[in-house]
């Protein structure tokens, strides 16, 4: 399994700050991207957090994964 460094966007840091749990977000993102072959093939992976936000993990150069969060609206 390949190791990745995680970097968080300002939106992800704010969302984790509001929830009060950046370590939990980091742990969840790492679990979600464990299948590095799929991440490397698609260059991104998304998952929903328990509080209804979409987390987007994007593979960057140098085995760095950018973690971003956006709110999911209902239509």
Image: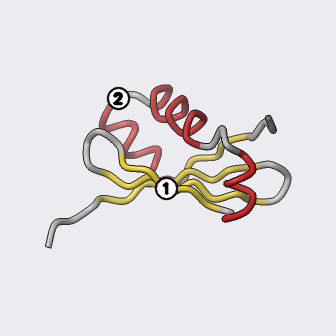
Q: Give the vertical position of 70 relative to 13 (above or below).
A: below
Query: Which residue is identified by label 1?
Result: 46
Going 35% across and 29% down the picture, which residue do you hit?
Answer: 20
Left or right of 42? Residue 11 is left
Left or right of 67? Residue 35 is right
Q: Position of residue 5 (x, y in %)?
A: 73, 40
Q: Position of residue 22 (x, y in %)?
A: 46, 31
Q: Position of residue 72 (x, y in %)?
A: 27, 61
Going 16% across and 66% down the picture, which residue do you hit?
Answer: 74
Q: Which mark is residue 20?
A: 2
Q: Position of residue 73 (x, y in %)?
A: 21, 65
For the residues marked 2 and 1, what is the alpha-carbon distance in whole angstroms? 21 Å
Going 81% across and 38% down the picture, which residue do you hit?
Answer: 2
Going 54% across and 29% down the picture, which residue do you hit?
Answer: 27
Label 2 sits on a secondary structure element that is loop
Q: Give the vertical position of 5 relative to 69 (above or below).
A: above
Q: Give the vertical position of 70 relative to 29 (above or below).
A: below
Marks 2 and 1, the one that precedes in the sequence = 2
Q: Which residue appears farthest toward the bottom when viewing the image?
A: 75
Label 1 sits on a secondary structure element that is strand
Q: Which mark is residue 55?
A: none
Q: Quadrant of residue 31?
A: top right
Q: Residues within 10 Å of mark 1 (few under 14, many from 20)?
A: some
Q: Give the vertical position of 67 relative to 29 (above or below).
A: below
Q: What coloring was used for the rendering?
A: secondary structure
Q: Quadrant of residue 17?
A: top left
> Observer-nearest residue: 55 or 14?
55
Q: Which residue appears farthest toward the right when viewing the image?
A: 62
Q: How many marks?
A: 2
> Observer-nearest residue: 16 or 33?
33
Q: Residues within 10 Å of mark 2 (few under 14, many from 20)?
A: few
Q: Which residue appears farthest toward the left when viewing the image?
A: 75
């Amino acid at each position: 399994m390949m190791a990745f460094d995680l970097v968080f966007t300002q939106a992800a840091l704010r969302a984790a700050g509001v929830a009060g749990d950046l370590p939990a977000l980091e742990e969840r993102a790492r679990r979600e991207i464990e299948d590095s072959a799929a991440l490397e093939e698609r260059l991104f992976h998304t998952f929903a957090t328990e509080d209804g936000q979409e987390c987007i993990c994007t593979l960057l150069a140098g085995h760095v994964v950018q973690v971003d969060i956006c709110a999911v609206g209902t239509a």
